[in-house]
Image: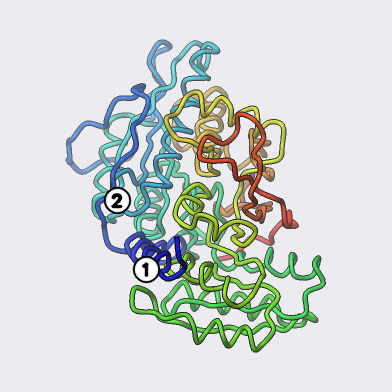
Amino acid sequence: MGNSSLRLKLLALFGVLALLLTACGGDTTDTTEAAAPDTTEAAAPDTTDAAAPDTTEAAPGEPIKIGMLTDLTSTFAPWGVHVRDGMLMAAEEINAAGGVDGRMVEIVEADSQNDADASAEALERLIEDGVVAVGGIISSGVAVPTAALAEELQMPLFMVKGGSDAVLTQDSRYSFRTCLPAAPMDADPVLQYAEEQSLAKVGAIVADYAWGQAMKSALETTFEGSDIEIQIEVAPVPPDTDFTPYMRALTDFGSEMIVATGHPPGGGPIVVLSQDYLDVPVTGSWNPLSLVVGNLEQAAVDRYADFGCADYFSDDYQEMAKRYLAFSDLTFMEDDAVAGHGIVTMVADAVGAVGDDPVAIAEYLHGQTYNLEGYAHETSWTEWGEMAAAQPLLVLITAGPAPEGLNEAGDWWVEELVRSDPLEPYVP
C-alpha cells in the first residue's frame, strides 16, 4: 500500500475513532461489536431512579453480581470488548475454582455507548440489579459524570482508561483508577525514556483542544529543568489537518523522538508521515496495539510506541494471555483485558473479606495492595482513588516473531523501551 493511500485511510479511521482517551469523550459513533462468550446476563432494562445500594447481606448461595459498564457499540468498543472478555474470563476462572466461599461470580453487562446520560442510566440499572461494584469505564466523557454518580450512590466504580484529571476529586472514595493514570502523570515516562536514551531533543505534536493543551502543559512542566530540549507543535484535529508543516518543524529542530500522545486523533497520520522525515519512535496514547498494527500495517513496525499497564514480558502475563486467547474470540490480550481481569479479581477478594456491602468493599480496597496477574506494577490507591504506584510500560511495535501462542493478530511483537519509575500520584 502506498503512503498516500494509507494516509487517506488513516485520516478517515482516526477521525472516526476520535481517540479522546484522556479528554472529553467525543460523539457517539456506531461500531460493530465483537462476539462475546455467552456467560453473562444483561442488566434489566428498568430506568427507575436508583436509591443507595442495599447493604443487606446476601444468602450464602446467591451469586456475587459485578457490573461491567464499558463501551461495546460505539467509539471505544475496540477497548471495551477486551475489558468485557477480561472480566468474563476472571469470573469463569473464579467459578471453576469453587467461587467465593461457594458463591458464583456473575458479570452483569451494560453498554456505556460512550454517552454520559446512557452511562448514568446504565449505572442505576446495575445498582438496582444488585451489583456490588462496577468496572470497565474507558472514555473520560463517561468517566467524569459516572464517577460523580458512583460517589453519590456509594458504589465502587473502576476506570480502565479515562484519564481526565476531572474524574477524581479529593473527596472521591468510591472511584478507582486501574490502568491509565491521570493525564498530568503521563509526561513522566516520556522524560524517563529520553533521559535513559541520552536524547538531546524531543518533539511533540499536540491537539488544539483540552487534552492536547493538558499534555502540552504536562510536557513543559516535566521537561523544565532537564537537559533535554523540547519543541511542541499545536495542531488542529483531523480530518482537515495536514501534519506536514509540523513534521518539517520537528525535523528542522532535530527531534530524536516524536510525542504524539497529546494528539490521539492524529496519531496514525503522524506515524505514517514520520516515515518521510524522521526515523525515530512516535508515542501513541494508550491505544490497543492490535488495532494500531491492523490499521497502520508495516508503518507501525519499529516506529510506533505506546504505553500500557500490562507487562507483556512477564511469565504471568504470557500464561494468562494463552488462556485468554483460548477463552475469547479476540486475537491479542490488550492491557484493557488485563485490567478487566484484575477488577473482578479484586472485587471477589473484597467480597470474600467483607461481604456484599459496597461501602465496606470500597473501604477494604483502599487498604489493599495487589500484585495482579499480568500487570506491570502493583495496584493500590491514594485516599481519593488515584493509583499510588503506577509504572506504565512503554513498548515499541516490532516485526516479531511473537512468542508462540501469544498473538493471533499477526507475527508482530513488542520491545520494551522503558519501564517507568513509580509515578507521583496526581492530587486533584
Picture coordinates of residue 227, whole percent (x, y): 80, 81
Q: Residue at x 41, y 32 (%)?
A: 132
Of marks 2 and 1, which one's residue comes earlier in the chain?
1
Instruction: Tell me the element at label 2.
Output: loop
Amino acid under label 1? Leu
Query: 141 or 255: nearer the eye?
Result: 255
Q: Position of residue 416 (x, y in %)?
A: 72, 51
Q: Amino acid at mark 2?
A: Ser
What residue is drawn where x is 30% and y is 36%? Answer: 126
How packed mark 2 is, by other alpha carbons closer than 10 Å (few <14, some 14-19, many 20 or more), is many
Q: Which one is closest to the eye, mark 2 or mark 1?
A: 1
- Which quarter of the picture shows residue 410? top right
Residue at (50, 50) in percent of width and height: 288
Q: Which quadrant does the C terminus fall into?
A: bottom right
Where is 51 relative to 164, above or below?
above
Residue 183 quadrant: bottom right
Q: Residues within 10 Å of mark 1 (few under 14, many from 20)?
A: few
Q: In this orientation, does residue 35 appear? A: yes
Give the image location of residue 292, x and y in percent.
49, 54
Which label number is shown at residue 8? 1
* 214 to the left or right of 255: left
Could you tell me if residue 362 is visible in this image?
no
The residue indicated by pointer 2 is: 74
